[in-house]
Amino acid sequence: MTVTEKIDTELLNAPVSRKTFDEVLVPTYAPSNVLPVRGSGLDVWDQEGKHYLDFTAGIAVTALGHAHPVLVEALTRQANTLWHVSNGFTNEPVLRLARALTAATFADRAFFCNSGAEANEAAFKLARKYAHAKFGAGRSRIVSCISSFHGRTLFTVSVGGQAKYTEGFEPLPPQIDHIPYNDVEAARAAIGDDVCAVVVEPIQGEGGVIPATREYLQALRQLCDQTGALLIFDEVQSGMGRSGELFAYMGYGVTPDILTAAKALGNGFPIGAMLTTEELAKTLAVGSHGTTYGGNPLAATVALNVVNIISQPAFLARVKAAGVQLVAMLQGLVRDYPQLFAEVRGVGLLQGLVVTKQFSGRSKDVTRAIEAQGLLLLIAGGDVLRLAPALIVSDAQIVEAGRLMRLGIDAFLAASSGK
């Protein structure tokens, strides 16, 4: 038997399980024992046939739910038409997608890639290149926020403000500083004439589901205008309707120079985008940046349909209404379990439930107990339960999530009191 025949007959159709992860994958994650195999809307079923209500949306990715019929049809149609062309050519879906995003936002130009990290990498490269061309090579410093998250490339993880993600990867790219989030005075002290860019998440996701204040973003805009630095909004998690606006910057009334998007843009099909102005886009001339798969017809077709659905005013109004219902449900948990939960914070359908000091570091334990009841949740660090359901979530599903959370919380507290 040849090696090829052995793979075909013995491996391709062999059973796999959570244990297989530990045998063949690089251990960069510690996934749940739940192994989803099928999804529809907010419903997910695992290998054993157990049903779960999904309030993770793949970390704010499947904003229109699993296997959305419009997206399935569009992807299938495109898969039967054209998958990929080299970047020596363009394609119709990506042109339509760029036109849709620039029509819906402040931007004049779009650059497409495969992920949020790549979108941020492009944004940071653009900012430095623009500053070098306009002011000289000495203007390279990037100011970011403590507890921010911007991706896992060496550049983006260095701009991110969480040391746990950079340990062991030194030396890190230089000329990157971090300031406290929502601290206007710290921003004023840090943003000088040597800064090429200030990058901020309008809603910190990985850092604990913390919304920026309007005053903070307005101050950053003013400081960037005064110094000539570029203002970059990382909307990888907060964008595409998550806040109740197409992008969160629209609700703040503060316009960035560069915006990055990904996650929900493809509803699970990998795509990222950097949006910017005509003037800035000229900086990235032919050959200065690129990507093999970015803006491929498959991804662009899916994303175009996602943008079309989410950008509808009635859809966004429903997201805002659902966000109100979700917050009310979570506030009920804070009221009824004061020993466990301290507060609710977030915007729209990105909400965080903060645990008390008594249970600091145990957010994962709480979500595991809730998971056992049939509800999938996220965490944002050791002290925050993160909820990011698909934007199509119904009021009935929010009520059911609350019921399952209470069952899981009761089980968690009972187990904790017995220790």
Image (tube, grey):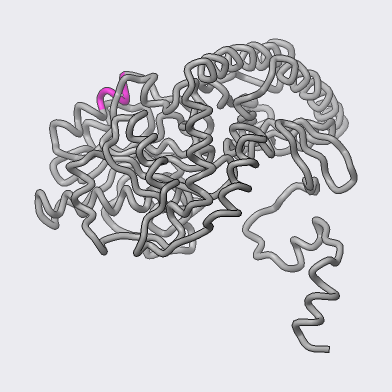
Give coordinates of residue 238: x percent, y percent. Answer: 47, 31
Residue 116, position in %: x, y? 46, 47
Most foreground residue, 145 or 59: 59
- Residue 295 position within the rendered picture, expressed as x and y whole percent measured from the top left: 43, 52
In which quadrant of the rendered image does the C terminus lie? top right
287 or 244: nearer the viewer: 287
Q: Residue furthest left?
A: 135
Query: Which residue: 29% across, 35% down?
Result: 107
The image shows residue 309, relative to residue 82, as above or below, that is above
Q: Residue furthest front?
A: 81
Asked whether residue 95 is drawn in magenta, I would say no
Residue 38 vertical position relative to residue 170 in the rendered view, above or below: above
Q: Residue furthest right?
A: 48
Residue 377 in which image quadrant: top right
Which percent across, then down, holds residue 181?
A: 38, 31
**What number of labels is visible?**
0
Along the viewing direction, whichever of 42 and 229 lies nearer the viewer: 42
Q: Is residue 140 left or right of residue 233?
A: left
Residue ID at (10%, 49%): 134
Q: Is residue 356 visible?
A: no
| Left or right: 152 in relation to 231 | right
Is residue 372 visible in the rendered image? The answer is yes
Q: Residue furthest bottom?
A: 1
Q: Residue at x 44, y 46 (%)?
A: 93
For the record, the magenta segment spans: 215-219
Residue 331 to residue 57: above or below: above
Q: What kind of secondary structure does the magenta stretch mostly adopt?
A: helix
The residue shown at (64%, 29%) is: 389
Quadrant of the rendering where the N terminus is positioned = bottom right
Most foreground residue, 111 or 179: 111
